[in-house]
Image (cartoon, helix red, strand yellow):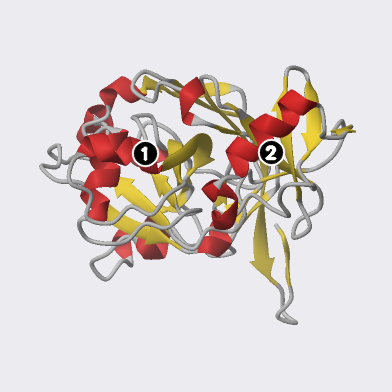
Amino acid sequence: MRFMRIGLSGSEQPVVLHGDRAYSLSPIASDLDGAFWADGPRRTSEALAQGSLSEVDIEGARVGAPIARPGAVVCVGQNYAAHAAESGSAPPSRPIIFLKTPNTVAGPFDTVTIPENSRKTDWEVELGVVIGKTAAYLASPAEAQECIAGYLTANDLSERTYQIEESGGQWSKGKCVKGYLPLGPVLVTPEEVDPSRLRLRTWVNGDSRQDSSTADMIFDVNHLVHDLSQYMELEPGDLVLTGTPEGVALSGRFPYLKDGDVVELEIEGLGRQRQDYIQRVREENGIGGRV
């Protein structure tokens, strides 16, 4: 199944896509949050079969992130062999983990505001994994599959000065700018996705930047969820970002993002994003505005 959230920021409504039509999930759930994953997909399937959901017109509506605000956003660094190489690092022997704050989540077509003092904002297309069942101290990677609600396209935007030069020894400073995690447009449930060989692509102003496959992952999805479960309890609705492939600005091959740029991202079978970028400046009266 394919789920979306439609509407103004903060008041999105959940829908399910069936064929070329969208249906309201209001009889089943108020949102695609952690509580939904307990039996929401089953109830949705039954309601579609019974024809009891109302069709809705989503043409022209704002598309929100396809999950409600997560309790945790757990990220994996340097999880593609080629990306580790372009970053000047050896492939990690164990997953590198850092966190993003939940207020980084944004819709896939929302405008992104670059902070006034940012000069190194970077794009990162990533496969996002939404947790549907508590994952704690799993016995094996095989058990991880039962804990996955679905997959989505993510742009793990990073500010490299904050992340590297001003890090203080950790990465999260460069990952937590508000709005620096566009998600969606859809969440696709596991029976429709093989996460091991998905093509991932990014364009900046129409020029290709990233073009790779999840086959280049060092640690696959099940390995990551199992590994994380040994150190933390992942809860329904949490989000795991699985790393980005080569082709980012950090490589030195491309300029960082600036005011007026347009970024597009796509993961095979999970949909395409597009964001306009604007940069704020601090004016004399202390009120920010666009460059």
> In what quadrant of the picture does the C terminus appear?
bottom right
| Spatial CA span between label 1 and label 2 | 22 Å
Give, as a three-letter code, the residue at label 1. Glu
Name the spot of residue 89 as percent of width and height, x first. Answer: 16, 41
Density class for disc 1 (Cα within 10 Å; few <14, some 14-19, many ≥20) is some
* Residue name at image x 87 percent, y 34 percent: 54
* Residue name at image x 52 percent, y 35 percent: 152
Helix, strand or loop for disc 2? strand
- Nearest the viewer among 211 and 239 is 239
Q: Which disc is residue 146 wearing?
A: 1
Q: From the image, state whether disc 1 or disc 2 is nearer to you.
A: 1
- Nearest the viewer among 199 and 143 is 143
The disc, 1 or 2, on the residue closer to the chain's N-terminal end is: 2
* Residue name at image x 72 percent, y 23 percent: 18
**In the drawing, does residue 19 fall left or right of residue 99?**
right
Name the spot of residue 203 as percent of width and height, x first. Answer: 55, 26
> In what quadrant of the picture does the N terminus appear?
top right
Q: Which residue is mark 2?
A: 4
Q: Which disc is residue 261 wearing?
A: none
* Residue situated furthest bottom in the rendering: 285
* Residue name at image x 76 percent, y 52 percent: 12
Name the spot of residue 61 as percent of width and height, x first. Answer: 84, 39
- Nearest the viewer among 274 and 55 is 55
